[in-house]
Image: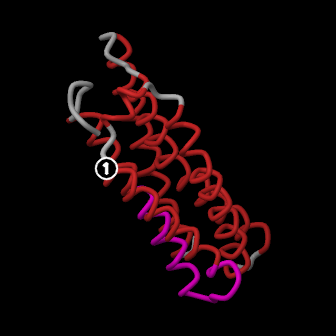
């Protein structure tokens, strides 16, 4: 097993662990009847930020196994990653509009802005990686991008745990 596959495998393990913890939290919130539309919005973001890195890492490992070419596998995975993130960014306004005006008022602008900046920056980096970067730089860009999205998932997890419906996002 190559170093890249081991690194991606470690990232997958962390991603799945975070998704599992988020599922446990959502079950407890549902049982206590405290799951608001805002909580559903946060949990959906958390699950996306937890599972997308795992999906992309598995994609890269799979393409590397099939093609026996890490550079091509990273390029394909970076393009798929950028596409998934683009879909996510485009969906944010419509998902926010599904919340009541009171719940939208609880969302901090800085929180949404940090997510959007992180995701858009990652889209640019992954697009460059899929087109122009090669070797270790391309893999490093992919791995760092996956790690940053996973970090956003951890931040979402902390917000769900710490802040309750009477608090702001």
Q: Which residues are magenta?
A: 128-150
Q: In this image, 123 relative to 149: left or right? A: right
Q: How many marks?
A: 1
The one of 168 and 57 positioned closer to us in this rendering:
168
On the image, the x and y values in percent for residue 34 come to 31, 16
Q: Quadrant of the rendered structure where residue 150 is? A: bottom left
The one of 89 and 146 positioned closer to us in this rendering:
89
Q: Magenta part mainly helix, strand or loop?
A: helix
Secondary element at tag 1? helix
Is residue 135 found inside the magenta-colored segment of the image?
yes
The one of 24 and 44 positioned closer to us in this rendering:
44
Depicted 31 relative to depicted 68: above or below = above
- Determine the residue positioned at 49% across, 68% down: 145
Quadrant assignment for the N terminus: bottom right
The one of 58 and 112 positioned closer to us in this rendering:
112
Q: Quadrant of the rendered structure where residue 147 is? A: bottom left
On the image, the x and y values in percent for residue 117 come to 44, 64
Is residue 121 found inside the magenta-colored segment of the image?
no
Depicted 120 relative to depicted 84: above or below = below
Quadrant assignment for the C terminus: top left
- Determine the residue positioned at 23% across, 27% down: 164
On the image, the x and y values in percent for residue 127 come to 64, 75
* Tag 1 residue: 155
């Amino acid at each position: 097993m190559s170093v890249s596959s081991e690194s991606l495998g470690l990232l997958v393990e962390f991603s799945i662990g975070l998704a599992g913890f988020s599922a446990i939290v959502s079950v407890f919130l549902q049982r206590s009847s405290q799951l608001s539309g805002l909580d559903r919005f946060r949990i959906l973001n958390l699950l996306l930020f937890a599972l997308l890195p795992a999906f992309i890492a598995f994609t890269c490992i799979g393409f590397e196994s099939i093609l026996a070419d890490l550079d091509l596998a990273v390029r394909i995975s970076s393009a798929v990653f950028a596409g998934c993130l683009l879909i996510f960014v485009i969906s944010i306004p419509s998902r926010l509009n599904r919340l009541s005006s009171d719940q939208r008022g609880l969302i901090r602008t800085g929180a949404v802005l940090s997510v959007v900046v992180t995701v858009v920056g990652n889209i640019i980096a992954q697009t460059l990686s899929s087109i122009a970067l090669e070797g270790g730089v391309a893999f490093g860009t992919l791995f760092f991008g996956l790690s940053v999205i996973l970090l956003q998932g951890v931040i979402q997890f902390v917000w769900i745990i710490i802040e309750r419906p009477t608090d702001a996002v």
